[in-house]
Structures are given as C-alpha cells and as structure tokens.
Amino acid sequence: MIKVILADDHTLVRDGLRRILESAHDFEVAGEGWDAATTLALVRNQPAQVLVLDLSMPGRSGVDLIKQIKEEKPALRILVLTMHAEQQYAVRAFKAGASGYLTKESASAELVSAVTKVAAGGVYVSMAMAERFAQSLNEPSDALPHQRLSDREFDVFRRLASGQTITEIAHALCVSSKTVSTYKVRILEKMQMPHEAALVRYALRHKLIDDQDEI
C-alpha cells in the first residue's frame, strides 16, 4: 500500500484525486494540505511515500516548498500535479527535487501510473512534457531573459504577466506589497524590459502563459 499526501488549495481537486487513487486499491491517502503551512505540517508528522503537490498554493512558491520539503524529508518523493504546462516550470520543479511532473489535464490512469512509478523510485514525465523537453534541445544554448530569474522572481514574473496586481501577488505569496514591488523592479532589470506590458508580450511570445492563463 502506497501512502500519499495530497496538497492542493481546491477541495474539489483533492476530492477527485482521493477518489482516483483509492479506487485503484493500491493507495492510501494519508492526509490533505490546502496551503504551504498545512502541507509542511503533514509532511513533518504524517508518514508517506509520495506527496502529490500543486505548484500554486497560497503561502509561498511551489518550487521553494519543494526545496524545503526535500531538505527536511529527502526520502519523500514529490509528484507535481499542476495546471502549468510550461517547460520552464517543469525544469525548475525537477531542479528543486521533484520526481515527477503531470498536468491537471492528464487522465486518471496516468495519475495512478505516475504515483506508482515515483513511489518505486522512478521519474515520471507526461508524454506531452517529454516532447517539450526534446524540442528544447534544438533551442539556442544562450540563456533567455526569463531563465536569468530566480525561482521566486520567475513566479512573480508569471503572475505579473498573467494580470495579477502587486497586492494580489503579495496576498498569494504571503509577503508585503513592497517586497513584490522590489521583485518587479529586479525582474524588469534582469530581463531588460521597460515596463510590465513588455513582460506580458514576452511571456505570450515564449508561451510562458496563454491568453486565458490564471495562476
């Protein structure tokens, strides 16, 4: 029996994941987290083999959370299940310590396969994401402007480009508006962009968001 912790800020999503896994009979849901704090508490106190983690929960950057969890519980395997299909998010998640990356459009059978493989010590990437990785091998090796950003800066960059205000971002990440404003200045400087509208155009051009994107 594989013990799994579910972490997503949407109750309906957690309910759906629980039903999918428990109907497969080889899994036991050991707990559910809905933000960074509850997820960390579960990881610290509830034995489990796999954490199924949404990247966009309240409290902090999903990539930062992965890093902290791997520092505290290196044996815990992390499967990212997210709405973000962009390759850069997957790359950052894997570098932080994730063992698998799956988008929420994936079929239920793929979720079961992914958790099983990750629990067994393997690495799981969906076919669509694997194709994106393969295509990226043909791209120029020089770092693109957004690749110069830290994980937190990249998160703030995408939120800005998706239309979130500084106040909304501050609330989502549990930091002050002043801190977000500082990140914004840094992002514009590092990417050599004159204003926020340029960030939006850049994000759309490089398919880091789409017209309907919502963090």
Image (cartoon, helix red, strand yellow):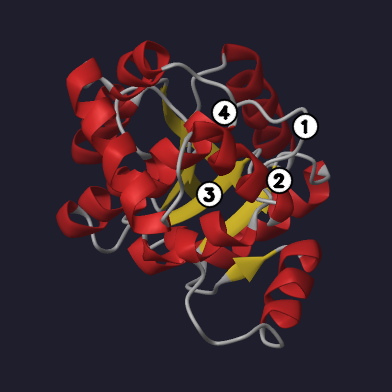
Question: Foreground mark, 3 or 2?
Answer: 2
Q: Is residue 23 visible?
A: yes
Spatial CA distance of label 3 from label 2 is 23 Å
Q: Earlier in the sequence, mark 2 or mark 1?
A: 2
**Residue type, label 1:** Asp
In the rendering, at what x and y percent does residue 185 appear?
29, 39
Question: What kind of element bears circle 2?
Answer: helix
Distance (Cα) linking label 1 and label 3: 23 Å
Q: On the image, numbered disc 1 is attached to which residue?
A: 211
Give 7 or 152, whichever is nearer the viewer: 152
The disc placed on residue 100 is none
For residue 16, which quarter of the picture?
top right
Front-lying residue, 99 or 183: 183
Q: Which of the two labelled residues, at mark 3 and mark 2, occupies the earlier sequence position?
A: 3
Residue 115 makes an appearance in the image: no
Q: Which residue is mark 3?
A: 80
Left or right of residue 70, residue 104 in this image: right
Report the residue at 79% width, 41% height from top.
105
Q: Rounded to the nearest whole Å, what is the CA distance between mark 3 and mark 4? A: 15 Å
Of badges 1 and 3, the one in the foreground is 1
Q: Position of residue 191 (x, y in %)?
A: 42, 56
Q: What type is the residue that disc 3 sits on? A: Val
Residue 215 marker: 4
Mark 3: which secondary structure? strand
Quarter of the rendering occupied by the C terminus: top right
User: Residue drawn at (31%, 28%), measured in percent from left and top?
Assistant: 36
- Answer above or below: position of 50 versus 183: below
